[in-house]
Amino acid sequence: MNSPLKQRSLLFLVKDNEVLLGMKKSGFGQGKWLGIGGKVEIDESIEEATVREATEEIGVIPRDIQRVATLNFYFPNVEKPDHWNQQVCVFIAKKWDGKVRESKEIYPKWFHFNEIPFSSMWSDAIHWLPNILNDTKLIGNFLFVNESDIGEVHIDEGKT
């Protein structure tokens, strides 16, 4: 945990008590439902990365994105933890241009807030996703005991 955390973006489109999740088809998170997002490129702001990733992965250009959370993930017990450790900046958009579409990386699907498939998501999502969907801003720190099991959770509400 000596290196700075890699920055990642994460976006959730929200409308009428529904949230758009993406089934990851390949790469990190394959087979899981998750938000739309990814790596921040060199000379790119976190907001620019969020818009770019949404355009690439689901074909929309989000407007008026709102930062709702900062999530820090630590994986001290995996091989090469600096590769896994990351800070994820989470955004919500209630407006966007374009029509949501599937890509080679993401199969998008709308879920009612009461029907989110937490058992098919990263294990941390249940600790913070309901809060941000209910307009609570937060900072979360998650210490994983391995690639998928959380050992410790600390959440501060009202901050990003």
Image (spheres, helix red, strand yellow):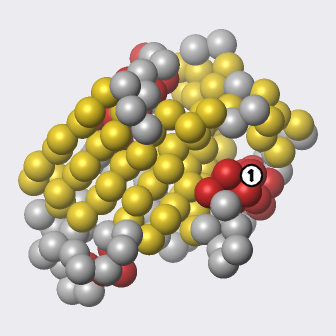
* Residue at 44% in and 63% down: 29
* Residue at 38% in and 32% down: 159
Q: Picture coordinates of residue 131 (x, y %)? A: 38, 24
Q: Picture coordinates of residue 11 (x, y %)? A: 60, 44
Q: Quadrant of the C terminus?
A: top left
Above or below, 100 against 112 in this view is below
Above or below, 93 against 73 in this view is above
Residue 57 or residue 135, whichever sits in front: 135
* The quarter of the displayed image where residue 130 is located: top left
Q: Quadrant of the N terminus?
A: bottom left
Q: Picture coordinates of residue 143 (x, y %)? A: 17, 57
Q: Report whether 67 appears left or right of 114.
A: right
Above or below, 128 against 135 in this view is below
Residue 31 or residue 54, whichever sits in front: 54
Q: Amino acid at mark 1?
A: Val
Q: How many marks?
A: 1
* Residue at 56% in and 38% down: 67
* Residue at 53% in and 20% down: 112
Is there any visible trace of residue 88 in the rendered image? yes
Q: Which residue position is annotated with label 1?
A: 51
Question: Residue lying furthest top in this view?
Answer: 16
* The quarter of the displayed image where residue 5 is located: bottom left
Residue 11 or residue 156, whichever sits in front: 156
Q: Secondary structure at mark 1?
A: helix
Q: Picture coordinates of residue 19 (x, y %)? A: 58, 28
Above or below, 117 against 90 in this view is above
Question: Residue lying furthest bottom in this view?
Answer: 80
* The quarter of the displayed image where residue 66 is located: top right
| Category of crowding for the residue at label 1, using alpha-carbon neighbours closer than 10 angstroms: few (below 14), some (14–19), many (at least 20) | many
Q: Report whether 102 appears left or right of 128.
A: right
Is there any visible trace of residue 110 in the rendered image? no
